[in-house]
Image: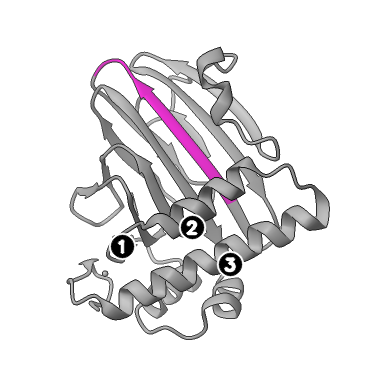
Amino acid sequence: MKLCCNPSFSQSFDKMPVPAWLQHMLCSWMHTACFRFSGGFVVQQSCCREQYSVRLTRFVITRSCTVFTELPKAVLALHCNTIGNWATQLPGLSPTDLDTHHQGFLYAPQDTLRLDLQPGTYESIHFDMDPILIDELMGTHWEILPLIEAYLHQRKTGMLLPAVPMDAAVYRLLTNMRNSHAEGEDLDALLINTIASLLFRYKCALSESNTPAAGNAVAPVFR
């Protein structure tokens, strides 16, 4: 996933070591890269598997800026916003604010996404998933079906389901995952169990919500 300060991606970020005061946030089981740009710097961590990926991104912004993200392929993602309120725009949708301490579900087409960032710290965790894995872990849940349909047909317009507050149980799941030193099959089992638990809690929250969905997602509620 590429990041740049302009939509043409002609101004690349400069790679740098992770600052010492951010070493504590790194996950031992993730691939890590850190980049400097005119507005601050970003730490990107990722762990990719055949049916899912876990991506943790933290921005430290020193001056107002716009960052563009180029997705190599369309994604279905459960997102957890742990720090900061994000302002983003999925293709075909109005600008959307994604609040801290909330989780939601999105479909983003293979395209360029725009992030408008004010000075401060931002962090999000994304779980990109294959539709087959979602069905196995979540079962048929009608709010999710339009996003899966859009993904399978490579629709050009993004879709965003409602964000719901992350409770203490969600934070425990994320903390245990991030602090794990598991490897191999043990790590795979931990990540699948974490994703399944997060999807279950999100599904329950959706079922209890009457909040209208954003964009063209089917109403009952990422960035």
Please tell me whether mark 2 sits on a helix, a strand or a loop.
Answer: loop
- Circle 1 packing at 10 Å, graded few (<14), some (14-19), many (20+), is many
| Amino acid type assigned to the residue bearing label 2 in the image | Ala
Give the residue at x 33% y 72%. Answer: 205
Residue 74's mark?
2
Amino acid under disc 3: Asp
Give the magenta range: 54-63
Query: Is 46 in front, or is 89?
Result: 46
For mark 3, does the 10 Å Cα neighbourhood hold few (<14), some (14 to 19), or many (20 or more) residues?
some
Q: In this orientation, which residue lies closer to the viewer: 86 or 76?
A: 86
Viewer-closest of 213 and 93: 213
Residue 220 % position (x, y)? 25, 79
The chief SS type of the magenta part is: strand
Foreground tag (3 vs 2): 3
Which is more N-terminal, label 2 or label 3?
Answer: 2
Can you tell which mark lies on residue 130? Answer: 3
Query: Label 1 is placed on what type of residue?
Result: Leu
Disc 2 crowd, CA 10 A, few/some/many (<14, 14-19, 20+):
some
| The quarter of the displayed image where residue 63 is located | top left
Q: Nearer the viewer, residue 171 or 9?
A: 171
Checking the image for residue 160, the label placed there is 1
- Quarter of the rendering containing residue 121: top left
